[in-house]
Image (cartoon, rainbow, N blue to C red):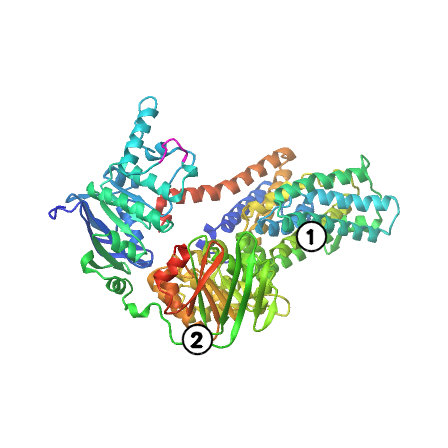
Amino acid sequence: MSEATPLLEMRSISKRFDATQALDDVGLVLRAGEVHALLGENGAGKSTLIKIMTGIHPPDSGEILLDGKPVTLRSSADAQRVGIAAIYQEPMIFPDLNVAENIFIGHQNRGPIVNWGAMARDAERILGDLDIQLDVRTPARGLTLAAQQAVEVAKALSLQVRVLIMDEPTAALSAHEVAQLFKRVDKLKRQGVAILFISHRLDEVFQIADRVTVFRDGRHISTRPRAEVTPEGAIRDMVGRKMEDFFHRSERAFGDVLLRVDGLGRAGAFTGVSFEVKRGEVLGFAGLVGARRTDVGLALFGVAPADAGTITLAGQTVTIGSPQSAMSHGIAYVSEDRRQLGLSLPQSITANVTLATLKRYLSRLGLIKPVAEQATAAEFREKLSIRAASLEHPVGQLSGGNQQKVMLAKWLNLQPQVLILDEPTRGIDVGAKAEVHHIVDQLAQQGLAIILISSDLPEVLAMSDRVLVMREGRQVGIFEHGVATQEAVMTAAVGVA
Amino acid sequence: MRLSLKSLRSWEGLLLVILIAVVALNIALSPVYLGVGNFINLFQLSIEKIIVALIMAFVIINGEIDLSVASVMGFAACVVAVVHENNALPFAAAVALALVVGALAGLVQGYFVAHMGLPSLAVTLAGLIGFRGMARMLVEDRSIGDFPEWFNALGQKPLLGPIPLALLIFVGMAVIAVIVLQSAAFGRYVTVIGNNADVARYSGIDVKRVKLSLFVLSGLVAALAGVLLAARLGAVRASTGEGFELDIITMVLLGGVSIFGGSGSLVGVGLSILIILNMRNGLGLANVEANTQTGIIGALLILSVLVPNLVNGLRRARVGRAGHT
């Protein structure tokens, strides 16, 4: 690792989009053979920097130095030519081409005819170097997301990349796949590639990065060697406030039991789920992917009704056969999938906030009262600090955190007694996460019974009064807050003694 | 509609420019174009189609399609004709029966789409064939006319000033349609479902009921249009209204309603109706034959589907991977 000339240097880069100063005089230095983590909330300017590095956007000012010499990147082809490539969360794969073709897409060994044999051998060699076991002749269509990503890494390697940008590469991977990816990253690093690694998951960043740079609001805040960075420090830099603000959970007084579930089940999904939630209590649902926690939520909300067991609400046995019946009993379900199940993306914030409660905004003629509707949306914008220029803005254009808040507003407007939150902080930045935690805490204080389904173990442990653990469609234990440690919960979730 | 640079860049703005061009051309080319008589006539010649286009806009915004409308029109007209021919019921009751038959046709198809989850393209294609077949069974190769004087008058003579009944119905329905789509809960639900039916379902909206209602309405309106067509033509054959569904769908798509559902405005549909009617009228006044007219309008439809896609494609190519964050 030579200290002398950095491999790539971004110097005093600024970029403005209309009213937003996306980058304001930022610098970033990448050395050969380092993994450099870039942290920042959504909107911190990470994506813009990547787009400038890969030639998609030109900077307004500032320069890019490669090996100490200024370069101009006018297109992504320019960037590729000098050895800068990027891998994204969703692999850019051609499903109908095979693995070898995908690796060599755009730069096959082209004579009059393609030398398939040589191409396959080269592909095998590259995959071998990376310890990736894949048949290079299988079409990419059938590959898992992790395997597709591995193909992308191989593609980058075949291009002889010098700078590899990995933008949230682990967001959709399991723990095991992440470990494998990291081994490959390590290999690239030893070959002298500079890697810019972007992730929301701090634990990964600390595991893999040599240096850590933090951006906030388009400005460079800090660059430090990993050894000098603590998670608390990094978060403080990212959000400009302290770690104590996270996992906000105040002492709460519980009321009587509001929701009781006995032996709940749905054929083919889950069986034997029994629990109680009191007013003012947060019951966490922990488990691995495939533990069928969401199915329990969907049964309580009537999307996929239970076919066994009983649901008792405030002492009354109820039957929930549809979302409408769940809503009439004061049960709300905030889906884990904002974009596919939660929000009508092209429509306005207002229309989304009132979507589940539109009947309350009708005049005697049956027409929507726009003023009343907007007043509600404005009230929630205030209460949940939804950041949007206008309430008429399409929800799809908001950041993940703000979308999440709009979804919360939609369901809080129902004034539910039972609130089921399914992965309420997935894919949103640290600051928004803290805000969501704060809101959940406040709702519990107001006496709502809350079911919190989350794959973020620290979150579910910190936020919940009790944690129910599921494994493969079965309930395997309920832990009190305090007794529920990461180890205890994980052990139950994985099912090893 | 507010006229600003921004609205001109929108689809409606483009349609408005085209409309102005077509109208200007018509004024320049034909001395008889500007006249109340020609203007009413221009509507009257396609009045049944534009009535059905209003409900078709809802169906397409909802993410579905109803290919059976022209066959339902023909079937309803045949019901009226056959009942009249056999003197089975008073004429007004025959009309009522035809409307009920149309609504039932929509109900059956809507049930298959909403409750059985079958694609509306397939279900209503079957409807297109099936209801036309039933019309043929009723009327065979006869031409049934000789309707009561008042019925023919309603279809052919002005009712209010120079305006005939069908145009009044269209204007009334257009006003209602705009209000419902803009301001009624039903209109909001139609749009949300068209965007993403799962989101609607997870929001406690009765998706099945909304879809079923739309198909029933579509059948009912198509039957009404069929009856009006019978009154205007004064005679009914098994082939009455055949092929109308294509013109109707063209009007809606050219109006900027997305074939994938979820977006579209009735202002756009209104403008596209005016463009098509004025083009046909102008081409007719210029003695262009009907087949050529159809060809030109077909080209217009292809453009309406192509242009937005091309613009989006170009924009995406320019931004490249900018969509990723």
Image quadrant holding the C terminus of chain A, namely: bottom left
Give the crowd class for mark 1: few <14, some 14-19, many >=20 residues within 10 Å.
many
- Which residue is disc 2 drawn over? A445
Which range of residues does the magenta coloring cover?
A: A134-139
In terms of secondary structure, where does tag 2 sit? helix
Q: Amino acid at mark 2?
A: Gln
Mark 1 belongs to which amino acid?
Answer: Val
Regarding residue A407, the answer to whether it shows in the image is yes
Q: How many marks?
A: 2
Q: Is residue A306 left or right of residue A451?
A: right
Instruction: Give x and y (percent) for residue A311.
Output: 57, 66
Q: Position of residue A111 (x, y in %)?
A: 31, 23
Q: Chain of mark 1?
A: B
Residue A28 appears at what percent x and percent y? 21, 52
User: Residue A455: in sight, yes or no?
Assistant: no
Q: Looking at the picture, do discs 1 and 2 lie on one chain?
A: no
For disc 1, the marked residue is: B216
Q: Chain of mark 2?
A: A
- Return the x and y of residue B262 as percentages of the image width and height: 54, 52
Q: Residues within 10 Å of mark 2 (few under 14, many from 20)?
A: many
SS for callout 1:
helix
Image position of A137 with respect to A348: above or below: above
Horizontal placement of B28 versus A342: left or right? right
Left-right relation of A153 to B146:
left
Nearer to us in this view, A149 or B305: A149
